[in-house]
Amino acid sequence: MKLTPFLRYLSAAGALFLATAAFAQSAALKADASVLSASGGSIQLSASVSYDAQPGAVGWSIALPADWTLVSVGGANVPEIAPEAGTTGTLEFAYTSAPAGRAEFSVIVKYPAGVKSAKATPTVLVRTAGKLATLNPTAVEFSSK
């Protein structure tokens, strides 16, 4: 049976849809506050990623303003690889054995006095069945009072 170009297109589109649906994933970074105190302080960021197929590994990167500092890492599924308290700049985390269905953790970061606005930009890498997917959750933006 000879397939017309349109049927070939539908067949390829259907296969792509099924492959995408089989490995559906989403990620989010949320903050416990969006307003920064003029005197400085700390913010808790909650990172989560959900997936249908069990990934072989999950990596998180959270780019913080240069003068922000990691205080601690905690939560339901703390990644096996995490930066030490006192780390600045980009924070990198990795699960070498990802939890089933969803992985989530939180970080507390400290910011200095006088910050007018700032942004935390996340990137998530998910390796499933030999394929690597890059997720770009929405950045968290902060402003002063």
Image: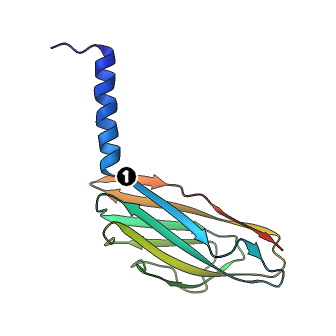
Residue at 33 percent of width and 72 percent of height:
99
Identify residue type, mark 1: Ala
Image quadrant in which you'd find residue 116: bottom right
- Residue 39, given in percent of the width and then of the height, sits at 82, 85
Residue at 52 percent of width and 66 percent of height:
61
Image quadrant in which you'd find residue 20: top left
Image quadrant in which you'd find residue 18: top left
Residue at 33 percent of width and 47 percent of height:
21
- Which image quarter holds the N terminus? top left
Residue at 31 percent of width and 33 percent of height:
14
Q: Please, which colouring scheme is shown? A: rainbow
**Mark 1 element type:** loop
- Residue 22, given in percent of the width and then of the height, sits at 30, 49
Picture mark count: 1
- Residue 41, given in percent of the width and then of the height, sits at 73, 85
Task: Report the front residue among 105 and 127.
Answer: 105
Is 14 on the left-hand or right-hand side of 76? left
Task: Report the front residue among 42 and 130.
Answer: 42
Q: Is residue 73 above or below residue 54?
A: below
What residue is shown with label 1?
Answer: 24
> Farthest residue toward the left?
1
- Which image quarter holds the C terminus? bottom right
Q: Is residue 84 above or below residue 122?
A: below
- Residue 141, given in percent of the width and then of the height, sits at 70, 64
Q: Tell me the crowding category of disc 1: few under 14, some 14 to 19, or many 20 or more residues within 10 angstroms, Cα based.
A: few
